[in-house]
Image (cartoon, grey):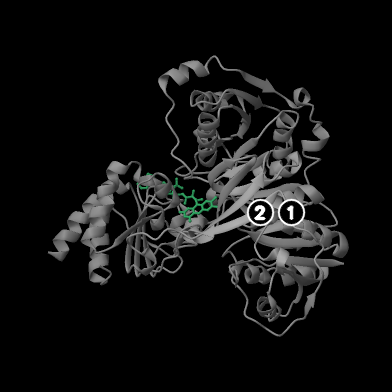
Amino acid sequence: MKMFTCIKYVPDTSEAEVKLNAEGTGVDSSRFSYDINDADNYAVEESVLLKEKYEGDVTVVSIGPKSSDVMIRMAMAKGCDRAIRIEDERIADHDPLMVARVLAGAIKDQEFDLVFTGCMAEDYGQAVTGVALAEILGVPHAAYVKKVEVEDGKVKAHRELEGGLREVVEISLPAVLTIQTGINEPRYAPIRGIRQAQKKELKVMNLDDLGVPVEEVGADASLVVLEKLYIPVVESKAEIIEGDPDEKAEKLASILVKGGLV
Amino acid sequence: MGNVLVLAEHRQGELRDISIEMLALAPSVAEALGGEVTVLLLGSGVDEMAGKIAGHGVKVLVVDDPLFADYNSDKYQKVLSALIDEYKPRLVMLGQTAQGADLAPALAVEKKLPFVPDIIGLEVEEGVIKATRQLYSGKVNAVVALKEADTGLVAVREAAFEAPDPVDAGAVEKIDSPLKEDLDYRKFVEYIEAEIGDVDITQSEILVGVGRGLKEDKNLPIAEELAELIKADLCGSRAACDAGWLSDDRQVGTSGKTVQPNLYICMGISGAFQHVAGMKGAKTVVAINKDPNAPIFAEADYAIVDDLLKVVPSLIEKLKELKG
Ligand SMILES: Cc1cc2nc3c(=O)[nH]c(=O)nc-3n(C[C@H](O)[C@H](O)[C@H](O)COP(=O)(O)OP(=O)(O)OC[C@H]3O[C@@H](n4cnc5c(N)ncnc54)[C@H](O)[C@@H]3O)c2cc1C
């Protein structure tokens, strides 16, 4: 089975203060720490599990800077076979349809059975790239996948719907699946794998190398314009409990008990 | 004409709330564009649903055909594609849901539509449609303009808008299915219901919720001890369930459970909208999080900005003292 797994290097902003850059056109990312997007990590694992079950190989595709090579090597340490990293400033990367077109440029002329993406990237939270990629490649897809069963040229994808309900759909291969978190238990890279990963191929390409015209994936091609960014005010009606940790705990305990809440 | 076409969503015979929530936005946008709102309903045996939607004073276009007995993104895409050609709506609206996210990106690519996903606001300024959406889990907002085009597409976040009350009866019009045959490359197989666990957290009076901020499963006993002390049940964010600290039936949020406890103490949960959507019904919310900008504080009645690993053990001691 030939597979491609698309991954993204994203900042962890769950604990960080996010500020805009001086121009207000983007965020100040200088103090962020980056890692693989959560859902993509599960996508890597799912492709490696299928490779172990059915034989085959996995090519990692990522659009990102040189610093993301550590993430790509880690995916290869876990069992992916080779990687393509696409780096080109001309890509309108706020628009997932442009991103999908670039990814398609790296995949479309190659043979493949399955393409995996994460269902959503944590930074922009759009949940678009994978399904758009399928349409561009002209193959079926299933989004928010929590279980994959491959049988005779078909895949049964268990899609996660609202409220924990699942929908099983059968689609023909080749296909694109967007993977939801929790589908598997991502492994830690074995030491041997980390060593081997250094020797695996990591090709760095730009739009010209891919043969993707900038007219199709640049800011002019994008049909949406990022007009303005702003930091929303968190409107909280909460009573803020102050003090050192023990004082806070004491005040809260008293609120809970006196208020008859516990 | 600046008409707005809204795609209704339903599942297992029930109209989903998002279908009506979108009608909180669609009429004002249609008015600003100089057009009208039409809701598209695809299904099989959906007269009652059509009537319910029409009760909001809109025109409902119904394709009632066994082909649409079960949801199928590819079939929906074929129908929408044909109807966009025929009716040329200025804007198509659908939900950012498990259905919408499986459909909208492909439709946008096929029809070359300006497309903004997961929107929480929508305006028309001098004829330009502008949508507001969130980045970085709600820490930044972005205004995204749709470039000039015959038709634009937006996917609306669930529970971001309050469903309007019914007004007067609109009209229902049935049309033939533009799609005539079943598809061979994608088939609906079955639904699998969520697993039922040992505790039904939708019925809990008090909940203690944990998130990724708990860091490791070896810290779980802190939350368990608190829960036991105050007779609470344990629940968590998706991150906590994905990590295997809790079983999936303990997950609160859009893809988990909707809870309505009297008291919800959540710790190390950032407050992603998918989580918040499931806890709107909680009466009193206590949030413990070390990030002062965490969106969870917008939902809280009592806020503690601190390290949960310091505050919670101390809270347990104080509660023991007070309760004797
Ligand atoms: C289709 C879809 C459906 C989803 N459905 C759900 C759902 O039903 N429910 C759900 O919860 N999520 C859902 N999610 C995921 C959601 O987007 C978030 O990723 C998730 O809720 C984050 O979980 P978290 O708050 O535990 O983790 P994070 O967002 O990583 O937040 C961790 C928090 O812990 C705080 N913290 C860290 N250390 C400490 C400490 N020592 N003391 C105090 N605080 C600390 C941090 O400041 C941070 O705010 C869904 C996502 C998608 C794409």
| Label 1 – label 2 distance at C-alpha | 7 Å
Going 16% across and 65% down the picture, which residue do you hit?
Answer: B323
- Relative to B196, does residue A126 appear above or below in the rendering? above
Query: Subunit of mark 2?
Result: B
Mark 1 and mark 2 in contact? Answer it, CB < 8 Å: yes
B267 left or right of A65 in image: left
B82 left or right of B213 in image: right
**For numbered disc 1, what is the local secondary structure?**
loop
Is ligand 1 closer than 8 angstroms to the Cβ of mark 1? no
> Which residue is at the front of the view, B203 or B144?
B203
**Residue A189 position within the rendered picture, expressed as x and y whole percent measured from the top left:** 44, 26
Residue placed under numbered mark 1 in the picture: B183
> Which residue is at the front of the view, B315 or B71?
B71
Residue placed under numbered mark 2 in the picture: B187
Going 78% across and 69% down the picture, which residue do you hit?
Answer: B30
Most distant residue in the top direction: A199
